[in-house]
Amino acid sequence: MIINHPLLGPRDASEFTYLGDASLINRPDWQAEDAAEAFYEYGYLRDNPAGEHQELWYHEAGDRSWLVVTRDTTTHEISKVELARDVARARGRSK
Amino acid sequence: MHDLIAITALGGSEPQVDTVGGITCREVPGVALASVAARMGQETKASKALAKLIGAPAPGIGQYAGDTVTAFWAGPDQWMIEAPFDTHEELADQVKSALGGTASVTEQTDGWTRFDLNGDQIPAVLELLSMLDLRNIDAGSVARCSIHHIGCFVLCRSDEAFSIYGPRSSAGSLHHAIVTAMRSAL
C-alpha cells in the first residue's frame, strides 16, 4: 500500500504507523457539563464502517508528521491524504 | 581536576574511516547541531530570521541551504541547523538569539552522529540501506528515512558526497549497516 504524503509524495505504508479513527482529533471539552459522558464516548465508542474511513497515520520513518488518510476499508483504496494539523485547524482546533 | 579524553561516537580517539571499492565512509564528529521548531502563528517570522542566520532562504520541503551555518528541513516548520563545532560550539544559543520568541530551539549536538560517504556509486549503497526514491534526490536534497530500523537524515551534497545523520547511541549499528552495504554493493 502506498500513501501519497501531501508534502513528500508517494511513500510505502511500511514507513507509517496506524493510530486509528481520525475522530480522535475531536477531543471533548473537559470543562463541559457532560464531560464524563463525552470522554467515555471519545475513548471507547467508534464507528466501524465497511467503506470510506478517515484515520490517523504517523509518518514515523519519515518526517514524523501526522496525517489524516481517507481509506476505503473494503478495498484499501486511499482517496485523500491531508496533514492532520490542517484538518484539526479546519475543525477549529489549535486556535 | 578531571582529565577526560574526548572519544568519537564509535569510541575511537580518531574518527573511523572505512574504504570499500570507490567509496569512503568517514565518521564526522566535529559538528554542532540544533533543532528549530517555529511556534504557532510565528512561522513566517521564524523562517525570515532563519534565512538571515544562514544567509540563504530557509530551506523548503526536503532541502537544505546555507554555507557555514546550514539548515535542513526536518518537518513542517521544523529544521535542523548544523555548523562546525570548533567555531559554533554554542550553536543552540546562537540560533536562539537569532530566532528569539519565534521558535523553540533545542541543543542536538551530542544526540546525533554523522557519517560522510564520498565516491561514485553511492546510490548503489543507499538503495540497499533505505527505501528512499534516489531518482528524486540530487544536490541540496535531504530526506529522513529508516536505515536498519534507525531513523536517519540523508543529505545529498553532490552526486559523490552524501552525509548520513543517525542517533549517536546507535552509531555502532549504523556504521555496521553502512559498511556491510558498501561491502555488498561494491
Image: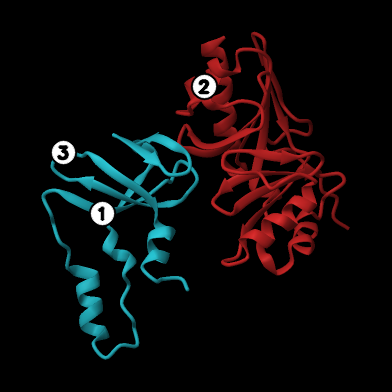
Chain colours: A cyan, B red
Relative to B177, is B20 on the left or the right?
right
User: Which quadrant holds the N terminus of chain A?
Assistant: top left
Whether residue B105 is visible: no
Residue B154 position, x and y percent, is: 59, 33
Q: CA distance from mark 3 to mark 1?
A: 14 Å
Q: Quadrant of residue B131?
A: top left
Total numbered labels:
3
Residue B102 position, x and y percent, is: 67, 66
Q: Are marks 3 and 2 on the same chain?
A: no
Q: Residues within 10 Å of mark 2 (few under 14, many from 20)?
A: few
Q: CA distance from mark 2 to mark 1?
A: 32 Å
Q: Which residue occupies 71% across, 40% down?
A: B65
Q: Which numbered tag is attached to residue A54?
A: 1
Type of residue at label 2? Arg
Q: Which residue occupies 61% across, 25% down?
A: B138
Give SS at disc 2: helix
Q: Which residue is mark 2?
A: B135
Residue A54 position, x and y percent, is: 25, 54
Give SS at disc 1: strand
Mark positioned earlier in the residue sequence (3 or 1): 1
Relative to A50, is B43 on the left or the right?
right
What chain does badge 2 belong to? B
What chain does badge 1 belong to? A
Q: Which residue is mark 3?
A: A75
Type of residue at label 3? Thr
> Does residue B31 sit above or below B98 in this rendering?
above
Q: Residues within 10 Å of mark 1 (few under 14, many from 20)?
A: many
